Image (cartoon, grey):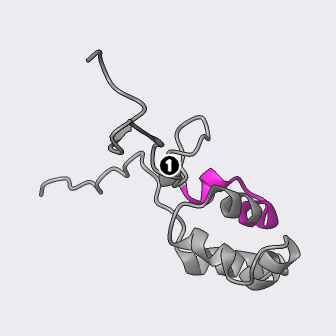
Amino acid sequence: MPNRRAPKKSAVREDWHPAIVVARLRMAGWSLRSLSVRHGLTHSTLQKANSQPYPHAERIIARAIGVKPQDIWPSRYDANGRALHRRRGPKPKTQSTHNGAARNVCRAGAE
């Protein structure tokens, strides 16, 4: 009879399920809503961290649970604990020319 082994677990850890995050907060005496209000945020702000990258909200939630954000959402952080995502910001500024047309201020290479 062949010897069958269980497949090896990959080194990549999965993010916690959102229900686990909420349950751990409840065990610590918090809800997402109460924690948001406690930190001066709108009542639904921390809910966003369960579905999309939001470093500030992730830190608040992790502190309340007593773990690091990269433990809860490892897919959002590198090996050094730095966030992998960028915060959305404004588009690059443009500079208008004398004829009213806009051109990108940051140009790659010489013209």
Q: In which quarter of the image is the N terminus?
A: bottom left
Counting every numbered tag in the picture gives 1
Q: Name the residue rendered at 56%, 76% in the picture.
A: 18
Please indicate whether residue 33 sits to the left or right of residue 17 in the image.
Answer: right
- Residue at 26% from the left image edge and 54% from the top image edge: 5
Which residue is at a point 87% across and 76% down the rendered structure image?
38
Comparing 23 with 81, the one in front is 81
Q: Is residue 4 above or below residue 18?
A: above
Q: 104 left or right of 92?
A: left
Bounds of the magenta segment? 61-73
Q: Does the magenta stretch include residue 110?
A: no
Write down the quadrant of residue 95 in the picture. Answer: top left
Query: Residue 70 lies in magenta, yes or no?
Result: yes
The x, y position of residue 26, in whole percent, is: 76, 82
Residue for point 42% across, 32% down: 105
Tag 1 residue? 85
Q: Check the image and name the residue furthest to the left.
A: 1
Residue type (three-letter) at the residue carrying disc 1: His
Question: For numbered disc 1, what is the local secondary structure?
Answer: loop
